[in-house]
Image: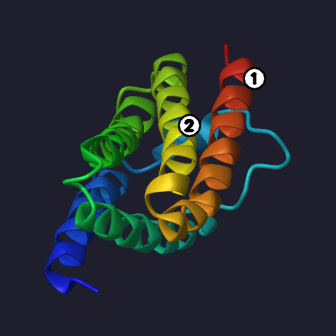
Amino acid sequence: MDWLTFFIFMITCCVAASTGTLFPTGEWYKSLTKPVWNPPDWLFPIAWSILYVIIAYAGMRIALVANEYPFAIALWALQISLNTIWTPVFFGLHKIRLAMWFMLGLWSTVLFMVLTYWSVDLLSSVLLIPYFFWVSFAAALNYKIMTLNR
């Protein structure tokens, strides 16, 4: 384990997570029509905290082989960028449809990460599967909120 590299990836994830504090759900989100399967608000910070540790750890592992697979670290950078931008677009700008496009980009990137990392670093790939499922759920939720609140 390379603690310094992990720390750098963890700080990057903390920056992404900070958008949740900068752009809280607020009254606008509470007023939206949401599906019955919308999770309670308290679940999101717990899920994301766990996922960000996993994402940082996978990023550290991929960074250790980045010389051989530079596209692998580029995928990590793309997913954290898309992850970071979604919250300000959805909660800050209230642009649900535009947020859906960012979510589709994030979903595609995480899927590509899981598939690509399978041959680069199997453990990183496996660790990112829960992230892929969570982003799949988030994409479905974004889509449903979008269709319920035209």
Residue 20 spot, x, y in % from top left: 37, 54
Residues at badges 2 and 1 in contact (C-beta under 8 Å)?
Answer: no
Q: Quadrant of the C terminus?
A: top right
Q: Residue furthest right?
A: 36
Residue closest to the eye, 134 or 113: 113
Residue closest to the eye, 30 or 97: 97
What residue appears at the point 65 percent right and 33 percent down from the top-left corner? 32
| Mark 1 burial class by Cα count in 10 Å: few <14, some 14-19, many 20+ | few
Say whether disc 2 or disc 1 marks the residue closer to the N-terminus. Answer: 2
What residue appears at the point 33 percent right and 61 percent down from the top-left corner? 62
Occupied quadrant, residue 43? bottom right
What residue appears at the point 55 percent right and 50 percent down from the top-left corner? 114
Residue 41 visible in rendering: no
Residue 9 vs 96, above or below: the answer is below
Q: CA distance from mark 2 to mark 1?
A: 21 Å
Dot 1: what SS?
A: helix
Residue 30 vs 9, above or below: the answer is above
Occupied quadrant, residue 71? top left
Residue at the disc numbered 2:
107
Residue at the disc numbered 1:
148
